[in-house]
């Protein structure tokens, strides 16, 4: 059995997630399909001798949604110090030379700091080729300061978390006959007043109904 996680696009509600699960489950060889609407991910288990990722993607598309290819492991970002630049034309010449390479996602050269920021697909172009492009433009690449793939990975994860919060933070809670607006994340501490006007503190997740989550900021 093979288990894969796919990024799904186009969902707007929980019904979308169920529609995808239903469509993927019909693919021969698929034993389990689970969609997390909040994180926009499909987790699918299948027999690789009967089903394939391509067939699963087609099932998602038939349901009216898209699949985003996960290429993060090949995306790299580097900051390359460069010597020899004297004007803005030098910076543009370097950008032009690097941009001609296949696999370059973004390139920007800062004349003031004498550095080039390059985002590239390491499956298509090597760092040595980028350096050679700088040399061909007439300038000298110095020692790489750092690769920041980890930063890109962290940024992507943070976007997923922010997306999760946006989808679950708009909720209403009812406790002791009092409406409580939920702000921030889905879980939280809040205080409710009962009929005798005594103030009672609770730890309550407004979206899941679970008790004991204190990561949110809810108020009456």
Image (spheres, rainbow, N blue to C red):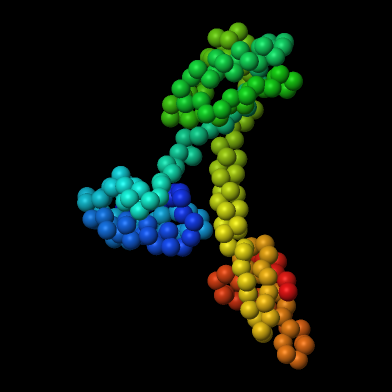
- From the viewer's perspective, tell me whether residue 180 is left or right of residue 107: right
Picture quarter with the C terminus:
bottom right
- Name the spot of residue 55 as percent of width and height, x first: 28, 47
- Tell me the quarter of the picture where residue 154 sits: top right
**Relative image position of residue 27 (x, y in whole percent):** 26, 55
Count up the numbered dots: 0
**Left of 139 or right of it: where is 75?**
left
Res 132 seen here:
yes
Query: Left or right: where does residue 163 sit relative to residue 27?
Result: right
Q: Is residue 189 above or below residue 143?
A: below
**Relative vertical location of residue 200 with respect to residue 9 in this rendering, above or below:** below
Residue 207 location, x and y as percent? 57, 69
Say which of 148 and 25 sits in front.
25
Residue pictured at 46% horizontal, 50% vertical = 10
Q: Nearer the viewer, residue 118 or 37?
A: 37
The answer to whether residue 6 is visible is no
């Amino acid at each position: 059995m093979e288990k894969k996680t796919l990024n799904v696009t186009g969902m707007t509600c929980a019904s979308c997630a169920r529609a995808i699960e239903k469509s993927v489950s019909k693919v021969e060889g698929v034993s389990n399909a689970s969609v997390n609407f909040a994180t926009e991910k499909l987790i699918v288990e299948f027999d690789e001798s009967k089903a394939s990722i391509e067939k699963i993607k087609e099932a998602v598309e038939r349901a009216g949604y898209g699949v985003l290819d996960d290429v993060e492991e090949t995306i790299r970002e580097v900051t390359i110090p460069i010597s020899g630049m004297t004007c803005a034309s030098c910076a543009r010449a370097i950008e032009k030379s690097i941009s001609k390479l296949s696999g370059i996602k973004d390139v920007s050269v800062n004349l003031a700091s004498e550095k080039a920021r390059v985002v590239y697909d390491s499956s298509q172009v090597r760092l040595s080729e980028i350096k050679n492009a700088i040399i061909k433009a007439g300038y000298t690449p110095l020692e790489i300061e750092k690769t920041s793939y980890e930063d890109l990975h962290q940024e992507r994860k943070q976007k997923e978390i922010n997306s999760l919060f946006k989808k679950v933070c708009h909720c209403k809670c009812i406790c002791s006959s009092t409406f409580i607006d939920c702000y921030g994340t889905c879980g939280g501490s809040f205080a409710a007043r009962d009929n005798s006007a005594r103030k009672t503190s609770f730890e309550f997740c407004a979206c899941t109904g679970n008790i004991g989550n204190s990561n949110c900021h809810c108020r009456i």
